[in-house]
Image (cartoon, rainbow, N blue to C red):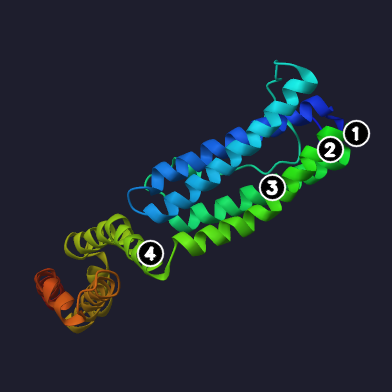
Amino acid sequence: MAKNFKDLSEKEILALAIALEEEDGRIYGDFVDGLRETYPASAKLFEQMQEEESGHRASLLDLYLVKFGEHIPHIRREDVKGFVARRPVWLVRPLGLHVVRKQAEIMELETRRFYERAAQRATDVSVRKLLGDLAMAERKHSAIAESLEEKLLTPDVLKEEEAAHRRLFVLQIVQPGLAGLMDGSVSTLAPVFCAAFATKTSWDAFLVGMAELFAISFVRNKYMDTPFFSAAVQVIFGGALVFAVGILIGSS
């Protein structure tokens, strides 16, 4: 059963803070691993953010050892009410760059709010000071991240990463979808059958078939950098089959 934040002792607050920093550090490490191959500059950015979290964790551990000894209670974010459930986007491969950056923003905001609330509850001067310092560090973290982003993610780098993002989108989404669409236009002729049987004319069946081919050509032109005319020619074989079937059915 989750515990209310207001009921946590200073020992539990510090233990939770250590666990949060460890979790955030691991997630940033997963971001680095997932982005390194395709988005090396962004991976470097998250690597430096991971180092920042490691420094925060070290400060918390040092203070905890002085105040409460070596045993740290196993308390996690899900054991305390008020924390937002995290979608495990870091487990997806390959990682989506925009999704990762948004997730990082949410993580930083939640950690900052935790330290602000924790500092208000702490009564021990040294604990209160460290938590307040970490809250301030988290507030500055966004500025640090923006500075690193300006330094590492230059316009040329951003252009390269956007191009890589586009290539991944084409390979993972567009091409499989296009293959299915082409298969559907050739083997699944339900719209052509329906048009032919409903209107009893080959012309309407032809129009329906051409609409499927136009959609395929549009997708190839927009997402695969294929000139529209060339895309239309590339699907002409499937179109010829659709056209022939439409005429045969419409004439029957």
Q: Amino acid at mark 3?
A: Glu
Q: Residue at 49% of width from left, 55% of height from top?
A: 99
What percent of the width, then of the height, locates residue 176?
26, 56
Q: Which residue is mark 4?
A: 157
Mark 1 surroundings within 10 Å by alpha-carbon count, few (fewer than 14), some (14 through 19), many (20 or more): few
Q: Secondary structure at mark 1?
A: loop
Query: Dividing the image into 4 quarters, which one contains the N terminus?
Result: top right
Q: Earlier in the sequence, mark 2 or mark 4?
A: 2
Residue, far right: 123
What percent of the width, then of the height, locates residue 88?
52, 41
Q: Which residue is mark 1?
A: 123
Q: Earlier in the sequence, mark 4 or mark 1?
A: 1
Q: Earlier in the sequence, mark 3 or mark 1?
A: 3
Q: Quadrant of residue 13?
A: top right
Q: Amino acid at mark 2?
A: Arg
- In this rendering, the answer to whether 8 lies above or below 230 is above
Q: CA distance from mark 3 to mark 1?
A: 22 Å
The label number, if any, that marks residue 2 in the structure image: none
Q: Is residue 98 visible?
A: yes
Q: Earlier in the sequence, mark 3 or mark 2?
A: 3
What percent of the width, then of the height, locates residue 148?
52, 58
Q: Quadrant of residue 77?
A: top right
Q: Secondary structure at mark 3?
A: helix
Q: Residue at 48% of width from left, 58% of height from top?
A: 98
Q: Residue at 14% of width from left, 78% of height from top?
A: 230
Q: Amino acid at mark 4?
A: Val
